[in-house]
Image (cartoon, rainbow, N blue to C red):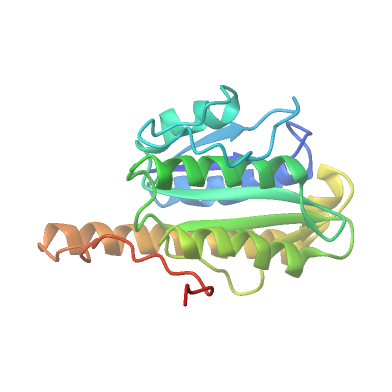
Amino acid sequence: MKVLLVNGSPHKEGCTYTALCAVSGVLNQNGIDTDLFWIGKKPLSGCTACRQCTGLNRCVFDDSVNEFLELAGDYDGFVFGTPVHWAGASGAITSFLDRAFYADLNGGGNRFFLKPAAAVVSARRAGTTATWDQMNKYFGLMQMPIITSRYWNMVHGTTPEEVRQDLEGMQTMEFLGHNMAYFLKCKEVGSKLGIPIPPRDPFVYTNFIREE
C-alpha cells in the first residue's frame, strides 16, 4: 500500500513539509510506503471552466496538476498539506485541487473513489480550522473517506524548528498517520473478504431554476 503526501506550500521544505514528514514517518512504521509530491512555486492557473478536460482525464493546462494526475492512480491514500493564507488554503493548492479533481470527475477518471484522504494545515497562529473545513469539502465531494486525528490536523510555527516544538501538533500528526494506516489495512481486509464496493450509478444533476 502507498500514500502520496502533497505539499501545497510555496516552500519545498518548510512548515507544511515538516508536518507531512511526521505523518509519513508514522505511515512507514505501519508498513505503508509513502512519497512526497511538491506542487512547486510556479504560478498555477485556476480552473477556467473550459470543460476541455471532458474525456481527456487530464487538464488542458500542462503543469504540476497533470504530473499529479499521472501518479495518483497508483496510490491508495492521500494527505494534502497547505499553509494558511488569509485564513484559508493557499491559492496554489486551491487552484491545484480545483483542476485536479474536476479533470478527474469530468474526464471519467477513477483515481480517487473511496481512497482515504486527509488535510494537514500549517499556520503561524489562526485560520487553521477554516482551512481544514475548506480542504475537507474536496474529499467529501470526491467520495474519499476523510481521515482525522485526535485533534484537528494542524501544526503551528513560522519555521520548521518551531513546528517541531509544537508537541501537541506533532502528536496530532502521529495519530493521523496511525489512523490512516488503520483505515487502509481495514479496507484491504474488506477487499480480500470480497466485500463489494458501492455501486456508481450515473450522476443526477439538477438546478434550482426550472422552466415553466
Residue 86, horizontal then vertical, whole percent: 87, 56
Q: Residue furthest bottom?
A: 212
Relative to 209, 191 lies left or right? left
Q: Residue furthest front?
A: 212
Q: Is residue 84 above or below residue 186?
A: above
Residue at position x 67%, y 42% in the image:
95
Residue at position x 68%, y 39% in the image:
46
Depth check, front residue: 186 or 145: 145
Residue 38, horizontal then vertical, whole percent: 63, 32
- The quarter of the displayed image where residue 104 is located: top left
Relative to 106, 185 lies left or right? left
Depth check, front residue: 70 or 78: 70
* Label tally: 0
Q: Is residue 69 above or below residue 148?
A: above
Residue 145, horizontal then vertical, whole percent: 42, 64
Residue at position x 73%, y 31% in the image:
12
Relative to 80, 44 lies left or right? right
Depth check, front residue: 133 or 149: 133
- The quarter of the displayed image where residue 133 is located: bottom right
Q: Is residue 49 above or below residue 135?
A: above
Residue 177, horizontal then vertical, whole percent: 52, 57
| Residue 171 visible in image | no
Depth check, front residue: 51 or 57: 51
- The quarter of the displayed image where residue 24 is located: top right
Q: Residue furthest top?
A: 62
Screen quadrant of the N terminus:
top left
| Residue 18 visible in image | yes
Q: Is residue 27 above or below residue 74?
A: below
